[in-house]
Amino acid sequence: MTLKDIKEFLDAEVICGEKYLDIEIKFAGGSDMMSDVLAFGQPGLLLLTGLSNSQSVRTADIIEAKAIIYVRGKKPDDIGIALAKEKDIPLLSTQHMMYTACGILYNKGLPGVSKN
Amino acid sequence: MVSSDLGLSERFEISGGDFSKAGTISTKIKEILQEIGIESSIIRRAAIASYEAEMNVVMYANSGSVILNITPEKLHLQLEDNGPGIEDIEKAMQEGFSTATDKMREMGFGAGMGLPNIKRNADRFEISSTPGEGTSLDIVFCLNKT
Ligand SMILES: Nc1ncnc2c1ncn2[C@@H]1O[C@H](COP(=O)(O)OP(=O)(O)OP(=O)(O)O)[C@@H](O)[C@H]1O
Ligand SMILES: [Mg+2]
């Protein structure tokens, strides 16, 4: 599914990276702990997180995540948004909570990260 | 930056306690590795290890440094800090062990996964620490394909 599909499924708002909505997303993972993300993250990941500081964007860049969805209506700070623009990482925000957001996407057929 | 056919060596200072800048050095190191054309899977592993190690210096030490050293054979990250040191390294290396404060957890850290993540991603990893003096890490990635 594309990021645009995901935006619609989650009623999400685009914070930045509107021009990347056509990218294809193949799997996702959710966590608020950045070391967890660094441990399970695979290149191409769609990251769902409730952590709204710039570290979420930095972590996404380090693991080569494709995009970030902030849950519970969170939005990153200005440093995070600036970094996302520099690194071409689209950021979206949904009002859904983590569990619900993940459930919706899983139901629509988006799998989790495969365990290696 | 010192660069030649034989390799590259660069030193970066890490300021402890400053969460707004935390991670910038690892982002920079990743950019350097991309510029000189290191294999992408190694860049990824090195970036993860560097970021975890940098975050630990920011969280637990007042200041520290990282030296990036690249030769045709290996990529070497040497971290040193003058923080409180680690009493029990074996314990610190266990997944889930963390002394992170609530504030650090709010910042998304403190899962006790950092050191194990570094070890898992590196080809060679050494940690040494003296309580009251500081901690140093040696993280090596092999560059020649086997
Ligand atoms: N540079 C350091 N100086 C002093 N203590 C350290 C240092 N690095 C790690 N430690 C100690 O080792 C523990 C485990 O470190 P580790 O990086 O594995 O987990 P964490 O930093 O607590 O959480 P996470 O890395 O998952 O965010 C830390 O909580 C801390 O007590
Ligand atoms: Mg850590």
Image (cartoon, coloured by chain):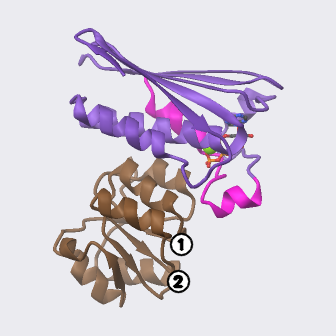
Tag 1: amino acid: Gly
Label pair 1/2, CB-CB below 8 angstroms: yes
Asked which quadrant contains residue B104, the reply is bottom right
Q: Is residue A47 visible?
A: no
Mark 1 falls on what kind of element?
loop
Q: Which residue occupies the extreme top position in the image?
A: B6
Is-magenta flag for residue A95? no
Q: Is residue B68 visible?
A: yes
Q: Which residues are magenta?
A: B101-123
Residue shown at 45% from the left, 64% from the top: A80
Residue shown at 66% from the left, 34% from the top: B63
- What colour is chain B? purple
Q: In this view of the protein, which residue sits in the foreground, A71 or A77? A: A77
Q: Of the numbered discs in the image, which one, if any, rests on residue A50?
A: 1
Asked which quadrant contains residue B55, the reply is top right
| Sequence-first disc among 1 and 2 | 1
Ligand 1's quadrant is top right
Q: In this view of the protein, which residue sits in the foreground, B20 or B41? A: B20
Q: Pointer 2: what residue?
A: A72
Q: Is residue B143 left or right of residue B112?
A: left
Task: Please provide percent x and percent y for residue A66.
Answer: 29, 61
The subunit carrying tag 2 is A
